[in-house]
Amino acid sequence: MKITGRSSSITNSFINSIIPIIVPTNEQVKEALDILGMDHDSFQCAYCGDTASEWDHLRPLVQNKKPTGYISEIHNLVPACGKCNQSKGNKPWHIWIISPAKLSPKSRGVLDINQRIEKLHKYESWLEPTKIDFESVVGKEKWEQHWANWESVQNTMREAQILAAEINRTIAKAHAKL
Ligand SMILES: [Zn+2]
């Protein structure tokens, strides 16, 4: 195990920690499920139809390790299963869904994929998504400080990993002599 192996989850936490979450009303959740053609008792993955376990951001919050400006709000969220969520990552949904990416609906042979794509397009045009220029709202100074903090954490992790590897070797050698 490596300390630096946690690098991308640290990056995600620097992004997700600054993004507001707009909690939807029950009415909005119902409307969302209606547009996706799901009944309100079963929670289905919008991409493949399996049982959903989470909400996935239709438009990614992160791209190239930076926030896109989209936020967590109901019309940017669809129910998804773990397989789809993982496979999609930060890719645009309409490209990913018919791509041969591992575990994508296309590569898993989902039969009603075209109907699902149609519903997702309808969902996208439901409400205008919020897209915020975070830097101009926050101000240059605080914005740059946030990313400087990120870089400092990354550098500390790299240095810590070098020392950890050295400690690991020392302990392994001591063990070999026992
Ligand atoms: Zn799915």
Image: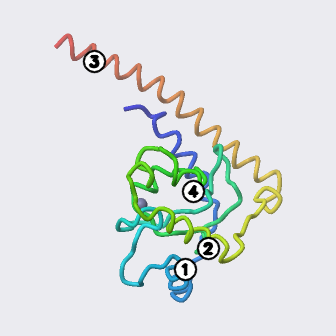
Task: Count the marks.
Answer: 4
Q: Residue at x 61, y 73 (%)?
A: 122
Q: Which residue is mark 2?
A: 122
Query: In terms of sequence position, does the residue under pointer 4 or pointer 3 come before the other?
Result: 4
Query: In terms of sequence position, does the residue under pointer 1 or pointer 2 come before the other?
Result: 1
Instruction: Please state which of the two labelled residues, at mark 4 or mark 3, is closer to the viewer.
Output: 4
- Per the image, label 2 sits on a secondary structure element best described as helix
Q: Is residue 102 above or below residue 142?
A: above
Task: Tell me, for residue 16, which label it has, or none.
Answer: none
Give percent across and percent down for residue 136.
83, 59
Quadrant of image for the C terminus: top left
Q: Which residue is mark 3?
A: 172
Query: In terms of sequence position, does the residue under pointer 3 or pointer 1 come before the other?
Result: 1
Question: What residue type is disc 2 on?
Answer: Lys
- Per the image, label 4 sits on a secondary structure element best described as helix
Q: Which residue is mark 4?
A: 93
Q: Which residue is mark 1?
A: 35
In the rendered structure, the answer to whether residue 57 lies left or right of residue 42 reads right
Quadrant of image for the N terminus: top left
Dots 2, 4 in contact, CB < 8 A: no
